[in-house]
Image (cartoon, helix red, strand yellow):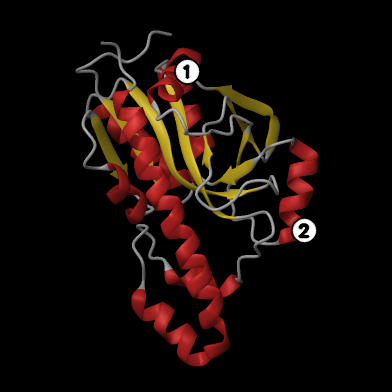
Amino acid sequence: MPLPSPGSAIGVVTGLTGERRALEALPGLTVRCEGPGPDKAEAAARALLDEGARALVSAGVCGALDPALRPGAVVLPARVVNRHNEGESWLVDAVWHAAVMAAAPPDATFNTGALLGSDTPVVSVGGKHHLAARTGAVAVDMESHAVARVAAEANVPFLVVRTVADTAADALPRWLAGVLNRDGTPNAGAAARRILLGPWRLPTLIRLAKRNAAAEQALSEAGAALARATRP
């Protein structure tokens, strides 16, 4: 499949508003965020196609399954696997994938292992270890498999750019679920209530916030390579 050329509309799907902010100022990219999860990602991808996108990207943060991946590590997978149907997988556009790596700074590093798409969050360390052993995937997110499916149906180029927020050794507390609104915006009030009801949660929240900030910074830098990776 040919590489998207200058002037082509590249539609980027994110699940969180922080991810959208990290990418939306980059030239040549149209970024849409409907909220986290596969259903929202599918809706965003279809809307981008309806608006004229000729290529689709799933971009944002992810959770590491490979213990070697640290916060801010860039995952540029060659393949996306559906956690719920491992016979269903999608290859990204190989030419575009290579062009993004070539457009990155010389000292940039990418992990190109498989990305696992999950309909539900993977919150426990044990769950991460189990999925890594079962699937061989290096990281997991909740949107890329949905975007991949839409791109395949539309026969348009597809790519994934993800950066690590939580590591394979990080458990995500269940109380974090309520600190995001359905559209992917932070719910500061909910976060404050959880801290007031359990002050011991504050160190965990601060640590995860720092890791998420590192992931969003890395996403912005990787997005710059994505924006440059078009035909001269």
Left/right of residue 171 with respect to residue 230 in the rendered view: right
Q: Position of residue 191 (x, y in %)?
A: 42, 78
Viewer-proximal residue, 7 or 13? 7
**Dot 1 amino acid type:** Ala
Residue lying furthest top: 2
Q: Position of residue 154 (x, y in %)?
A: 40, 19
Left/right of residue 110 with respect to residue 45 in the rendered view: right
Q: Secondary structure at mark 1?
A: helix
Q: Is residue 190 visible?
A: yes
Q: Earlier in the sequence, mark 1 or mark 2?
A: 1
Q: Secondary structure at mark 2?
A: helix
Q: Which quadrant of the rendered structure holds the C terminus?
A: top left
Q: Nearer the viewer, mark 1 or mark 2?
A: 1
Residue occupying the point 35% across, 80% down? 189
Q: Quadrant of residue 184?
A: bottom left
Q: Position of residue 121 (x, y in %)?
A: 59, 56
Q: Quadrant of residue 193?
A: bottom left
Viewer-proximal residue, 171 or 120? 171
Q: Is residue 114 above or below residue 122?
A: above
* Dot 2 crowding, Cα within 10 Å, few <14, some 14–19, many 20+: few
* Dot 1 crowding, Cα within 10 Å, few <14, some 14–19, many 20+: few
Residue 98, numbered circle: 1
Residue occupying the point 62% across, 46% down? 69
**Dot 2 amino acid type:** Gly
Residue occupying the point 30% across, 42% down? 23
Q: Is residue 143 visible?
A: no
Per the image, the residue denoted by label 2 is 126
